Amino acid sequence: MKQGFRQSMAWLHTWSGLVVGWVLFAVFVTGTATYYRAEISRWMQPELRREATIAPEALAAAAERAVAHLEAHAGHARTWFVGLPTPERPLVELFWRNRPGTPPGHVLLDPGTGAPAALRATRGGDFFYRFHFELNLPPLWGRWIVGICAMVMLVALVSGIVTHRRIFSDFFTLRRDKAAQRGWLDAHNVSGVLALPFHLMITYTGVVTLALMYMPWGVTAAYNGDQFAYFAETGQITKTRPAHGQPGTLAPVGPMVAKALATIPEPLERLTIANPRDANSTVVAVFEEPHGLSHEHPQVAFAGTSGAVVEVLSGGLRPAAKTFTTMVGLHEAHFAGGALRLLFFVCGLLGCAMVASGLVLWTVARLPRAGIAPGWGWRLVHALNLGTITGLPAGIAAYFLANRLLPLGLAARAEWEVGVFFGAWIAVALAGAWPAPRRAWRGALGLVAALFVAVVLADLATARASWDDPLWFLGFDAVLLAVAAGFALVAHKVDRFAAPRRARRMVEESAAAPQMGRA
């Protein structure tokens, strides 16, 4: 390498980070929000009333009502999924898969009556969860794009460590009195180093969670492409029971639920009913994962027509599968308590700052000198930076705002919320073409702050009467106001910023100008 190894790594770090930076920022922001996915969903459905506990008898009765609804409305579906009520979310969530090429079905039921739940339609926090690894694209395309970007990010992280010889000593120095480029580099270093173990862990485990999609050849060769056989043999799911092709009647699921609860001590999460009208139907009770790093779900499988237990799955994973499920558990952090989850959230915010500061650093380092018009490449990167770094938060605020302002009875209401999210993102991104970069940043950041304030005002005006826990909702709104204050502060700094050295030079030149005139 003519420039030397470290210089080559610097080039690789710069360009690998730039090419995927915009996607990574979106992944980091939505992934960080996912740590509070349940809380976001609760805020977006204020009509939902939490319960202290749910008795086993109530779970069994809710399961019976769910199956009755599915038999009446999805009798020809291949698979039924019944999400059972929990104290935090006392709803029955039904999902079913039809024939290939036919869209699946989904509905929320009141567990006490079996009638459709009287709640506003929304995707809630699940939208951010799916977006952060699918980008709201068809799953195959979205997961491949995110996976490739995550692999490139690993390259950027390693090359960044190699490039910065004094990365840890620079962490303790934030040179605000230097040039703008130096300040942005320090901000990039601090946000990168402070949570570097988290960045490496979350990126690597994110790739591992979808490893079978990216590298399926081992399972394909060993199991003739049957991934379900692989998961069953490694102890991650119960064995599949193929349909006989003869009609059968599903036995009452209430006794199955009671028997499953007596077998596994964990909370029951859902039922999966395969081939519900076949003589060889199967009902699988899936429980929440036990406390620990490994992401594994104990399961009890029943013969659908008789209700007899055919398999109990409660741990005992093989080493390779245990390693995989531990990687998934580390990535999703379901094991984390309140304090640890907050730490993960803060590290996620630092990841957002690391990516954003790196993108801005690229444009600051290549800012043309005074009197020279920037080239189309610089303008393109600047527009993408502004559109991503400010457009995505604006879309999130608009998504929350739409949840409060759209009519409750609007058809396809959840899709309208998502449409508002992307519409606001695109609208703010168009500001990136504004000819005055500082004015564009100031306006976009100010708009984001105003949108988050508007969300809080809309919540107080429209949903306050529905709150079951006013302190909780006020706390959520306080977080939104803190986000608004952060964006307002950054907008103010952008408006008032002048690099100290450049400012001093301008003062000296303006002071020397009259003297030169008198001479």
Image: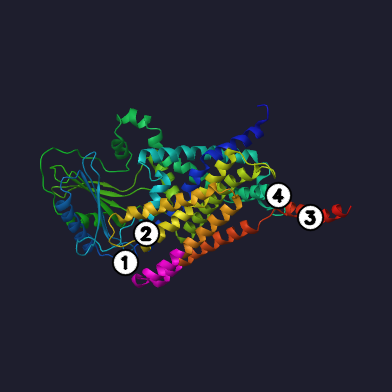
Mark 2, mark 4: which one is toward the viewer? 4
Are circles 1 and 2 on residues that touch, CB within 8 Å?
A: no
Report the amino acid beneath label 1.
Glu
Above or below residue 493? Residue 430 is above
User: Could you tell which of marks 1 and 4 lies nearer the N-terminus?
Assistant: 1
Q: Residues within 10 Å of mark 4 (few under 14, many from 20)?
A: some
**Above or below, 10 relative to 434:** above
Identify whether 241 is placed above or below 34. above
Q: Residue at x 52, y 40 (%)?
A: 153
Task: Please give the residue where the numbered disc 4 appears in the rendered image.
Answer: 179
Q: Which residues are magenta?
A: 454-476
Q: Nearer the viewer, mark 3 or mark 4?
A: 3
Q: Where does residue 159 sit, x and y in percent of width and height?
A: 59, 37
Residue sitting at the far front: 518
Query: Looking at numbered disc 3 in the image, what kind of residue is underneath it?
Result: Ser
Which residue in the structure is indicated by mark 3? Answer: 510
Alpha carbons under labels 2 and 3: distance apart: 57 Å
Residue placed under numbered mark 2 in the picture: 41
Dot 1 falls on a residue whose secondary structure is loop
Amino acid at pointer 2 = Ser
Q: Residues within 10 Å of mark 3 (few under 14, many from 20)?
A: few
For marks 3 and 1, give the CA distance.
63 Å
**What mark, if any, has residue 47 been given in the picture?**
1
What is the crowding at mark 2: few (fewer than 14 residues within 10 Å), some, or many (at least 20)? some
What amino acid does circle 4 point to? Answer: Ala
Can residue 176 be seen here? Answer: yes
Asked if residue 138 lies left or right of residue 163, the reply is: left
Residue 180 in the image: state x and y as whole percent.
Answer: 67, 50
- Residue located 43% across and 53% down the image: 34
Query: How far apart, in angstroms, are the residues tagged by discs 1 and 4?
Result: 52 Å
| Comes first in the chain, label 3 or label 4 | 4
Q: Foreground residue, 38 or 446?
A: 446
